[in-house]
Amino acid sequence: MLHNYSTASKLSREGKCRQVGYMDKAVPEVRFAPNVSDDLVLVSVPALAEAFFSGVDKFLVHMFEDKEKAPIAEQRLKNLVQAIPIKIENTEVV
């Protein structure tokens, strides 16, 4: 989207991948209708966010259950980018 101002990319124009369109809450959460378009998949943004954070939660639990990998993960998480709220003129900014 950044360079083309559309969902089409070089790979999608070459037929090597599908375009992904985003929609608000929807049932079902992922829609693919090849009779309408065989190169477009629509994804619910709230469902995508929920799936992402659920996957992160499960990954972290699984990672810290492994006694070999836990110390490595712990060290790397210390360097993870973090957002720290700051105050500018009595307004909190994140």
Image (cartoon, grey):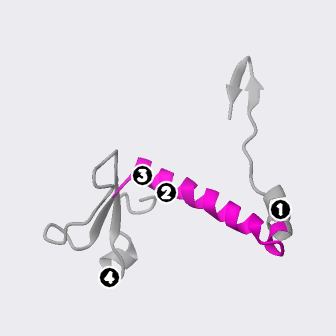
Q: Which residues are magenta?
A: 43-70
Comes first in the chain, label 3 or label 1: 3
Q: Name the kind of residue labelled 4 in the image.
A: Glu
Looking at the image, is mark 2 or mark 4 earlier in the sequence? 4
Residue occupying the far top of the picture: 90
Q: Is residue 58 left or right of residue 45?
A: right
Among numbered discs 4 and 1, the one appearing first in the sequence: 4
Of callouts 1 and 2, the N-terminal one: 2
Separation of residues labelled 4 and 3 (CA atoms) = 29 Å
Name the residue carrying label 4.
14
Q: Nearer the viewer, mark 4 or mark 3?
A: 3
Residue under label 2, please give it: 51
Q: Is residue 53 left or right of residue 76?
A: left
Which label number is shown at residue 47?
Answer: 3
Q: Secondary structure at mark 1?
A: helix
Between circles 2 and 4, the one closer to the viewer is 2
Q: The disc labelled 3 sits on which kind of residue?
A: Ala
Q: Is residue 44 above or below residue 74?
A: above
The x, y position of residue 52, in whole percent, is 53, 57
SS category of the residue bearing label 3: helix
Q: Earlier in the sequence, mark 4 or mark 3?
A: 4
Please, what is the three-letter code of the amino acid marked with disc 1?
Glu
Q: Position of residue 74 (x, y in %)?
A: 83, 62
The residue that label 1 is drawn on is 74
Q: Is residue 46 magenta?
A: yes
